[in-house]
Amino acid sequence: MAKREAIFPAGRQALYEINRYSAAIRSGDLLFVSGQVGSREDGSPEPIFEKQVQLAFDNLNAVLKAAGCTFDDVVDVTSFHTDPAKQWETVTAIRLKAIGDAPYPNWTAVGVNWLAGFDFEIKVIARLPQPT
């Protein structure tokens, strides 16, 4: 069995080390990205919700980029929300800018009551681009 290949973008190492997880794992032609939150480089939450969501997407983009992917390669999304009804409009506006036009990836949104001080988290599975 092949060993896990961990992917880490530059920055935010404190968050990965404190919680002992990889930003993403490459397995075959798939990339499994851990939940990304709107954390600053020191791991602390961005307090303004809209900025927290944008930062979560920015952090996700950095992980995808470190693996040679873009949002176009994302096939499956799971997002976690502490107050989905109140937050959905803000999240949707930011996600449509990041994800782009149809066809859209699969998306599952889950309401939760705890995200370690955050209000939004997003995790994805992406297909790694094949060399041409």
Image (cartoon, rainbow, N blue to C red):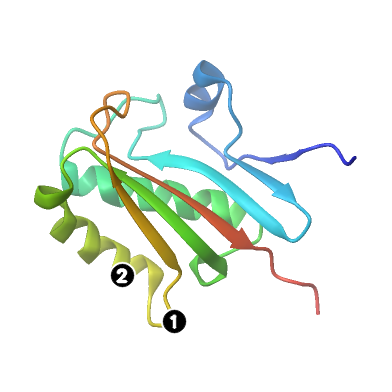
Q: Does residue 121 appear left or right of residue 18 in this picture? A: left
Residue at 59% across, 61% down: 126
Q: Residue furthest left?
A: 86
- Dot 2, how many residues are within 10 Å of its Cα: few (below 14), some (14-19), or many (20+)? few
- Mark 2 lies on a secondary structure that is helix
Q: Does residue 27 appear left or right of residue 68 in this picture? A: right
- Quadrant position of residue 44: top left
Q: Residue 55, percent across and down?
A: 33, 46
Image mark for residue 2: none
- Dot 1, how many residues are within 10 Å of its Cα: few (below 14), some (14-19), or many (20+)? few
- Mark 1 lies on a secondary structure that is loop
Please give the residue where the numbered disc 1 appears in the rendered image.
Answer: 103
Image mark for residue 97: 2
Q: Residue furthest bottom?
A: 102
Looking at the rendered image, the disc whose residue lies closer to the viewer, 1 or 2, is: 1
Image position of 85 with respect to 18: above or below = below
Amino acid on which disc 2 is placed: Lys
Residue at 39% across, 69% down: 99
Q: Earlier in the sequence, mark 1 or mark 2?
A: 2
Q: Nearer the viewer, residue 7 or 74?
A: 74
